[in-house]
Image (tube, grey):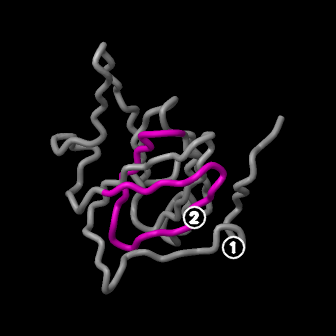
Amino acid sequence: MIDGVKLKRLRVIPDERGRLAEILRSDEQEFFIKFGQVYITTAYPGVVKAWHYHKKQYDNFACIHGMMKVALYDARDESPTKGEVNEFFVGEHNPMLIQIPPGVMHGFKCISEYEAIVVNIPTEVYNYDEPDEFRVDPFDNEIPYDWAIKQG
């Protein structure tokens, strides 16, 4: 596991009316750092949204509709896991929160047959004038990861 990345299995509570799942609580000392904002991002089937990283912000991803393949790459020079890649399959069939620390490159690909929706609860408010977001091409880069489906 990449240093600083945390995973939390989401507990889904179903009943005859529907279901409930808590994503992040302010009293969870292991996960809650601070609140910046909440937003959703989506991807259509087969679409890759990658790579990017932040210098200040932690991301807290949870795929709430569909399925996503989430990939992380540790490019931090000072990290004991520099160069490591993590891959997670999250969403309706595997409800999970992924906490991604600053400096860890990340992205995702929709692997469901319909649009996937991710809720993100970052620790910082998005600054439109000076975004804490740094992008790398999803396919033309030095990251040892292939977004293609792994057959067999």
Give percent across and percent down for residue 68.
Answer: 55, 45
Tell me the residue that label 1 is attached to. 141
Q: In the rendered image, which quarter is residue 112 located in?
A: top right
Tell me the residue that label 2 is attached to. 50
Residue sitting at 24 percent across and 49 percent down? 32
Magenta span contains residue 124: no
Of mark 2 and mark 1, the one earlier in the sequence is 2
Q: In the rendered image, which quarter is residue 145 located in?
A: bottom right
Which segment is the magenta one?
39-66
In this view, 124 is above or below 30: below
User: Mark 2 packing: few (<14 Cα in 10 Å), some, or many (20+)?
Assistant: many
Instruction: State whether residue 6 appears in this view.
Output: no
Please state if 79 lies on the left or on the right of 13 as rendered. Answer: right
Spatial CA span between label 2 and label 1: 11 Å
Q: Label 2, secondary structure: give it.
A: strand
Residue sitting at 32 percent across and 22 percent down? 18
